[in-house]
Amino acid sequence: MNFKDPNQDLHDLPKFETSFETSKVYNFDDPVEKKFSKELKQIHADGYAILDLNQPDEIYETINNKIDNKIFEGNPKLNPKYYHYNENPRVIEAWRDIKEIVDLARDIDVLDFLECVYKKRPIPFSTINFIKSSEQPLHSDYMHFSSKPERYLTGVWFALEDIDINSGPLQIIPKSHKLSITTLEELSQDIPKNTKQLKENYTEYEEHVKKVVKHNNLDSKKITIKKNQCLIWTANLLHGGSPINDETLTRKSLVVHYHYENCSYYNPGFSKFSEDIMAVRKIEEITY
C-alpha cells in the first residue's frame, strides 16, 4: 500500500485544519452552525472547545454507580499497564454494558457539533472511564488512533461530576493542534516487536513532546469543567492528566474518541511511512 507521510497530505485534511479564516470554513447562516458559532471559532483557533450539554442529572449518577460496581465488584477491562502512571484504574469500553455511556457518546449536541467541524458524520468508537486523574504526561491521541485522510479524529472529555482544580484535571496545550504529526521516522524508531519495545518507544515520544512544547513556547491550561459539560479537542492537540494535589478528590469523567465516515483507520505506533507499512485498524461504532 502506498502510504504517504501524514505531514505531506495537507490537501485531504479537515478544512478547519488548513484555513485561517472561520468564514471560509463555517456557514454561520446555517441554524446549527449559528448555534455553535462561539465554540466553532474557538476550536478553529485553539484546537478545543467546551460544550454545555442537556443531559438529565440522573445519567451521571447512574454511570458513576455502575463504574464503581465494575471496579469493586466485577472484573473491568482496564487500559494496558504500560499506559498507566499511577494506581488509579481506567476502565475501557464500558459502553458495551452501560447504556448510559452510549447515551453520552451519542449526545445529539456533540454529534451535531462534530459534524459542523469536520463536515463528515462522526463515529464514536472507544471509551475510557476515569475515577481519578491518570497523571499521564502530555500526548496527542493521534499517536494512538490515526486516519486516512489524516486528522479525522476527535477526543471528548465528559465531566461526570464537577472537576476540582486540585483533583488533577485534564491539562491541554492550546494551539498545539497545528503542530506536525509525530511519526516513528521523526523519532528514529522501529516498529515495536513486543510491549517492552512499545513502552520504550512511547516513553521517547513523551520526552519528545516536552521538548516540542518548550521549543514552541506553548502554554498549558488546566480545564475545570462542570457536570453536564464536555471538553472537545482535535486530533493532534496535546493534553494529559495533571498531577493530583488532593488525593481525597475524585475526577470522575468519561473520554470518548470519534473517527469519521468515509475514512480508513490505522495504528500509528505500528506504521512506518518510509517502508509503506500501515497497520490497518477496524473500529466498532458505539451504538445501541
Image (tube, rainbow, N blue to C red):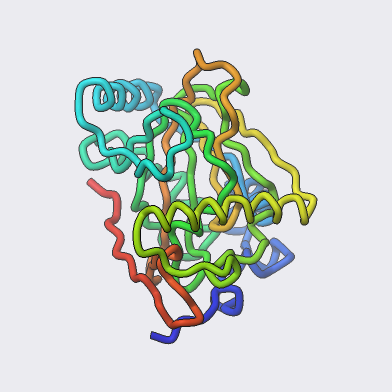
Q: Is residue 154 above or below residue 100?
A: below
Quarter of the figure with residue 270: bottom left
Residue nearest the viewer, comparing 97 with 180: 180
Q: Looking at the image, which residue sits at the far right?
A: 217
Q: How many marks?
A: 0
Q: Looking at the image, which residue sits at the far top?
A: 248
Residue 208 horizontal/vertical position (percent)? 63, 56
Quadrant location of the N terminus?
A: bottom left
Residue 159 horizontal/vertical position (percent)? 48, 30
Q: Is residue 73 above or below residue 102?
A: above
- Seen in the image, is 66 located left or right of residue 177? left
Q: Residue at x 50, y 59 (%)?
A: 142
Residue 81 horizontal/vertical position (percent)? 37, 41
Q: Residue at x 60, y 69 (%)?
A: 186
Residue nearest the viewer, comparing 248 with 198: 198
Q: Is residue 225 above or below residue 187?
A: above
- Seen in the image, is 22 located left or right of residue 105? right
